[in-house]
Amino acid sequence: MTRPKLVILEKENSEIGPGYDAERKFRSEAIIRDMATYTELPYFALSPQIASSFENLAAALKKPMGSHVRKVARALDCFLLVTGQGALLRDKCHIQPEVALQFAGALWSGRFIEGNHKSRYMLVYALIIVCDRLQIISKDKFPQISTKGVTNFWCEKRREFEKLVLDSEQVTLCRGWPALGTFGLRWYNLRELHLCYGARFAASFHNAIQTYYSGRRTQHALGVKEFIRYLEISSEKWNAGHFTSRASTTKLFAGFALHLVKTDGETQDYTYIVRKWNKFLEFLEVAFAANLFARSYSLPPFPNAGGANRRTNIRTDANGNKWICKLITDIPIKVSDQEAIQLVLEKIHVDLDVVVQWAEFHVKNIWHRFEEWRRLAVAGAVREIGQPGENRHTAITKRTNPNWRENVAATFKHHGFYPSSDSEKKIDQLYEGLTGIAELLALPTSISLLPHMAILVIEHPKITGSFLTNLEMYDKNARLSGITDFGGSWIIDGVKLRKGPSTAQQTFSLSDRAKEVLEQVVALTQPLRKYLKEQGNPLWRRVFLHCGKGFAYPTEVLPSSLIHGCIPELTAQFEAFFSGSRAELERFVQRFSLATLRSQTVVAEYIKRPDIALVARRLGHERLNYKQLDRYIPPPLLAFFQERWVRLFQCAVLLEALKDSPYKLRATGFSSMEEVHTFLANHALQVRRGGNESSMDRTILNIEDKVVFGLSVDSIAVMESIRIAVQRHPSPCGPLSTAWAMLATRIRAFADSSENMMEFSMMFEEAKGRVNPDLYKGLLHA
């Protein structure tokens, strides 16, 4: 075979980028969109002998060529199926040269396989090795390929493939059934459903899966793959026509529930099985709505495992009453006045301040290290692995080198981030070990960005952990989308999935501190973002990324999971800012999360300004919902504010009436003037008064200039009776009766001086006939 002359007719568009993200694969019209679809499938067109030859060759080759050979085998299997040659090699031990060349032409076609020029080149190059090693076509006779573009020979072969009439059913089977969600792309094997129940049923089932994932944060549709498998093994009993009958679907789902218990019961605990079933019921609601199945008469309920309630943040009182408390601070079921004062004035604010100090310290710490390594990089030298004459014993990044820090920084700046799993880059050798390198380079490790998230939540309590996890800096076209600079202010645009698809989008302006923190996050995660983009991983668009303990493959930050897995590390971090006992510290860290921090922040604000409508707005709720707010403001504190404001008002009135009386402490229930001062200074209604009183008096008498009383003839008669009885009594009366007597005197004085004196005078005149001081003689010592 004569080797054709190399003529490049088509140059690859370099702007396409090195990889395709999940949405591009999902929308692609190519037959093969992702090789991951086929890894668990058997070969349908290749004989066992040929498949074994591919596998043996792949095992003998070094990475990544071995994996490319396996991809070539899968792609060849699909090629034979869609071109109607499925039976050609089923009983053969050898691949014909003409088939190999036809297949190579298909590899250059976007109609056959999704990818860019580099990925196609690597597959064709792997095919060349296969053909050479399996003696199909020798390497020197195989038509030449180029990294710069597609040659004239391969353009012609590509055209030949694209003119073929393909087997439409095999095309459907080879294209697979992907689901696109916040996690990226997940593939479902509906091949047997297609073959057993028909193409229409398989397509409808696929649409139901996609609908289920749309607008949900969930990573998995639990129970769906098991249900698909159950339909496969039950295909002799059922057909698609049965699924329109409610009686049939009732039997179908009852059978699946029993199947699930039997199969999962061997390896999973019962609680997990119940959770999987309940999640599967959510998918069924989607399937019912899509008319994929007739709604069954009933669905078998799984009895509760009898374990603890799995809802989080549950508190229980001595009578077994349960309520939700999403606070870092531990709130008792009931609070006395003294406990309420301590909680409101001290503990809630102190605990919040601990988080603020912790977050600010670690934000400043990692930013200082970030700026330091960039400064070091300027003075360092770059190391290349495998460069001529290199001696590992004298490598410039070795710790024995006096300038190793500068050299490590310069090397990282030059090469960028690569995970330790990347065998080509040999990161461990490049830095002569990875111990301490992540800290030196200020890499965003597992919980490094948790303090940044905490500050953002404190500044804007409407932000949730999931909002930050899903916050994207760029859209699918690599344009800035989630963060916009508007006149020096940053506008953040993200999704709070729990609010539902219609109201999930949240857009708001960041405070100056929040903007500063987010700017630092973007800078810290840039090396990871660059690597993910080069790999074609859609997570590169996310703002919050981390790299595990230092050089793990970058992924999104899931705060709840990271906190749960890093309790010892967080405990050590918080210890420097916590003044309580070790046991209290451990309880504090156990309760800490971005959810409890949101609640702590809004409760602290509520204490300063008890406005539940404001709390709802700060939390980003669409409307005021008292039941929803119960999850943030614990009922004991809510009761404290709702009930004690009334008592406080009454207390303030009594203090005003008794400001010169020695009974004012006994009358108000306080044990000392200091307690009165503390209580009223933080809770009393704010008033405008003259400057004659002392500071203490102004605090105690902290009430409005005008107080509204609901007066009636009866209430005037009662107060006047008490006033006269106290005046006539030969010895001092009790504090409460004295208080009401003095209050009655002041009300009468106000009525006599009022603009509505005529109306009040008539009421007082009528009340005279009902005044009876003798009725209250027995109460004068109260």
Image (tube, helix red, strand yellow):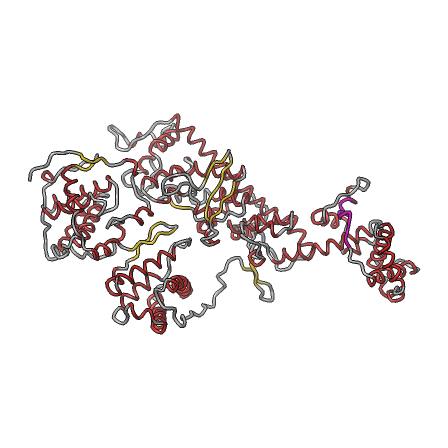
Q: Is residue 580 left or right of residue 26?
A: right
Q: State whether residue 436 appears in this view.
A: no
Residue 536 at what x, y percent from top left?
Answer: 32, 42
Q: Is residue 236 magenta?
A: no
| Nearer-the-camera pick, 15 or 363 | 15
Q: Main secondary structure of the magenta part?
A: loop
x, y percent for residue 109: 21, 44
Residue 604 in percent (x, y) is at 61, 48
Q: Quadrant of the C terminus?
A: bottom right
**Foreground residue among 9 and 418:** 9
In the rendered view, would you say 271 is above or below 392? Answer: below
**Residue appearing at x 48%, y 39% in the figure:** 518
Q: How many marks?
A: 0
Residue 231 placed where, x, y %?
29, 66
Please indicate, yes or no, whether residue 442 appears anywhere in the rendered image.
Answer: yes
Q: Residue furthest bottom?
A: 247
Which image quadrant for residue 531?
A: top left
Compared across the picture, whether 250 is left or right of 726 comes to left
Q: Residue furthest left?
A: 1
Residue 733 image-quadrant placement: bottom right
Q: Does the segment drawn in magenta span residue 700?
A: yes
Relative to the observer, which residue lies in front, 449 or 258?
258
Q: Quadrant of the N terminus?
A: top left
> What segment is highlighted magenta in the picture?
698-708
For this orientation, the residue located farthest to the top is 379
